[in-house]
């Protein structure tokens, strides 16, 4: 039978099938071939006489993320709080670069808008000026803006990610709605923490919509690219490639740089540009060690 991995703990995988959720182990061939099943994988399962199963095939992935380590996400929602805790926009940029690398569209969600000032909201908007990312300000507590977020999830498999303490789990419960009780029972079966998400878990909103709840993070590395490739993964920089005076412009120290012109004109965020420079140098210097 076919199913979807909704949780993985300690070498055991829980697969949602038409027969219900089945506890499975992967066949030994996957370990031999150094292939790791991921939450979100669509798989084929051979059911055993004791009710458990063996994962016999992992179907082709639409996308694969390293962190959070999930498969087949078609949308990412990066969740921060507006002010409690204060958002780390450098951390946000690192996540966004990784999603650009994976080809997964991202929407920025800033929770706790009910206790935010207009100045705080405007500061966040300015922090992503010119990037093209959609930004939503919501309150999971008061349900402000959550109906609009729910519409964005329709027909998607969405990975919800962000630091701890920003209200991700509350938002997940809002999105699940009438399925909350059923999901709670499933979560208990597969040892999901009540308050803190320790493992990525995939939950069904409806027959066409799924949501990953993922562990919070406080750091995020950008791996697998050279410094000169970073410009590709900043949309506001990418659109100016080829318009600078020098071919291969790093957009840092060269004269007649289109990106720096846009920065000077206030068309792109200084915060995003500063983070780009920081990441560029970090990646460039990494090769020395």
Image (spheres, rainbow, N blue to C red):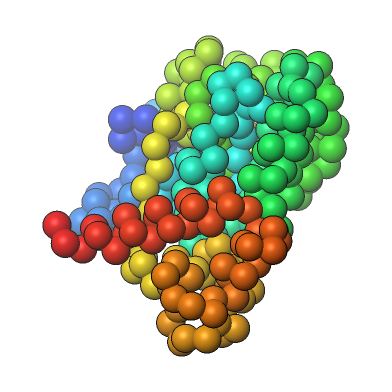
Could you say which is closer to the camera, residue 87 or residue 273? 273
Could you say which is closer to the camera, residue 246 or residue 52? 246
Please tell me which residue is depicted at 39% across the width and 37% down the height of the picture: 219
Residue 262: image location, x then y, percent: 65, 67
Residue 47: image location, x then y, percent: 44, 40
Residue 253: image location, x then y, percent: 42, 70
Q: Confirm whether residue 207 shows in the render.
A: no
Q: Quadrant of residue 159?
A: top right
Q: Quadrant of residue 29?
A: bottom left
The C terminus, quarter of image: bottom left
Q: Farthest residue to the left: give it.
A: 289
Q: Farthest residue to the top: give it.
A: 194
Question: As drawn, is 223 to the left or to the right of 182?
Answer: left
Q: Confirm whether residue 87 shows in the render.
A: yes
Please tell me which residue is depicted at 83% across the width and 30% down the height of the picture: 145
Residue 49: image location, x then y, percent: 40, 33
Depicted 102 relative to depicted 50: above or below = below
Depicted 188 relative to depicted 96: above or below = above
Please tell me which residue is depicted at 68% across the width and 33% down the height of the picture: 110
Could you say which is closer to the camera, residue 90 or residue 263? 263
Please tell me which residue is depicted at 69% across the width and 63% down the height of the picture: 265
Looking at the image, how many numbered discs can be counted on the residues? 0
């Amino acid at each position: 039978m076919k199913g979807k991995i909704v949780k993985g703990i300690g070498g055991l995988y829980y697969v949602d099938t038409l027969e219900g959720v089945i506890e499975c182990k992967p066949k030994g061939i996957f370990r031999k071939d150094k292939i790791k099943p991921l939450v979100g994988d669509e798989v084929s399962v051979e059911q055993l006489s004791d009710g458990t199963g063996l994962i016999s095939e992992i179907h082709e992935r639409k996308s694969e993320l390293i962190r959070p380590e999930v498969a087949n996400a078609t949308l990412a929602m990066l969740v921060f709080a507006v002010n409690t805790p204060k958002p780390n926009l450098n951390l946000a940029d690192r996540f966004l670069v990784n999603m650009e690398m994976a080809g997964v569209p991202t929407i920025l969600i800033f929770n706790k808008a009910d206790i935010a000032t207009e100045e705080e909201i405007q500061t966040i908007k300015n922090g992503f000026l010119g990037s093209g990312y959609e930004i939503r300000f919501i309150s999971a507590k008061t349900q402000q803006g959550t109906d609009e977020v729910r519409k964005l999830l329709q027909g998607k498999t969405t990975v919800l990610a962000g630091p701890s303490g920003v209200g991700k789990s509350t938002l997940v419960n809002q999105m699940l709605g009438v399925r909350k009780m059923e999901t709670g029972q499933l979560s208990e079966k597969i040892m999901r923490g009540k308050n803190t998400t320790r493992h990525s878990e995939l939950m069904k909103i409806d027959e066409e919509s799924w949501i990953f709840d993922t562990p919070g993070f406080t750091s995020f590395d950008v791996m697998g690219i050279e410094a000169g490739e970073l410009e590709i993964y900043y949309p506001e920089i990418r659109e100016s490639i080829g318009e600078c005076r020098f071919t291969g412009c790093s957009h840092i120290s060269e004269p007649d740089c289109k990106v720096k012109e846009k920065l000077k004109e206030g068309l792109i965020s200084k915060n995003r540009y500063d983070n780009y420079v920081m990441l560029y140098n970090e990646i460039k210097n990494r090769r020395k060690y």
